[in-house]
Image: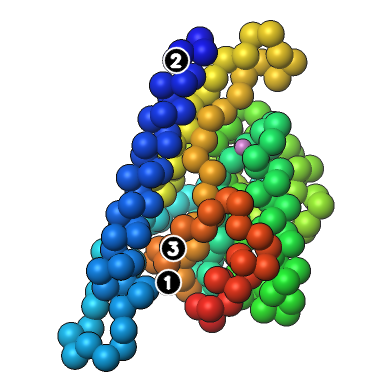
Amino acid sequence: MIKIRTVLWIAAFAAVAAFLVTYLVTARTGGIFASGQSSIEAPTLAEQISLGGPFRLVDHTGIERSDADFLGKFMLIYFGYTSCPDVCPMSLNRMSAALNELGSDAEKVAPIFVTVDPERDTVEALNAYLSFDRRLIGLTGSDEALAEIAEAYRIYYQKVEEPGSALGYLMNHTSLFYLMDRDGAFLRPLDDESSPDEIAKIVAGYF
Ligand code: NI
């Protein structure tokens, strides 16, 4: 069991590492760090890395939501699950605190939490979990719908049975924030350990 989990974690880290290396190389060769002096306009990061896409899910109040509902806002998206013992609660707290840092500009952002555990994360479970900050939008759906959005956003997730624990199982999952622009196009990933202040500054930099 431990060996399998180790392999899964290595696979997850390798996937994220490969993605971030691509991101950094892209950034260095013409994306976000390109100087404005060049006569040839460098392709944007979003043009170079395809991530994201259409989705149709259900929010924490039971209303069907699609990507089109969030056009005009910057989506700040995090994938996780409400039974997560450690990382997800901290990430959501950072997201919430970043919205506070943004002040009235927070309304330009759609802060979205997509579950990777639809079995336990019903509409009701999401609603209760996100009650600490009513600006947060929880999304759940069928296994198929969630597998689709996870693939589109390159999210790794894997159920890990924990027979000895009260939870029964945990979910290993990618832990990154993704920032999408007003048209739903990918802008950049943000480290899940970014401070609320850092998150707010990065997001506001695109307004
Ligand atoms: Ni988690």
The amino acid type, in three-letter code, at marker 3 is Arg
How crowded is the residue under tag 2: few (<14 C-alpha within 10 Å), some, or many (20+)?
Answer: few
Regarding mark 3 in the picture, which secondary structure is present there?
strand
Label 3 beta carbon less than 8 Å to ligand 1: no
Circle 1: residue type: Asp
The residue shown at (39%, 55%) is 52
Q: Are marks 3 and 1 in contact (CB under 8 Å)?
A: no
Three-letter code for the amino acid on which mark 2 is drawn = Ile
Mark 3: give few (<14), some (14-19) or many (20+) Cα within 10 Å: many
Pick the residue in front: 50 or 194: 194
Q: Residue furthest left?
A: 40
Q: Which residue is mark 3?
A: 188
Task: Identify the element where label 2 is drawn.
Answer: helix
State which tag comes first along the sequence, 3 or 1.
Answer: 1
Q: CA distance from mark 2 to mark 1?
A: 40 Å
Q: Secondary structure at mark 1?
A: loop
Label 1 belongs to which residue?
183
- Residue 87: in sight, yes or no? yes
The image quadrant that residue 151 belongs to is top left
Residue for badge 2: 4
Where residue 128 sits in the image (x, y, percent)? 79, 43
Give how far apart the Cα atoms at labels 3 and 1 are.
14 Å
Q: Earlier in the sequence, mark 2 or mark 3?
A: 2
Which residue shows up at 74% across the image and 15% down it?
A: 166
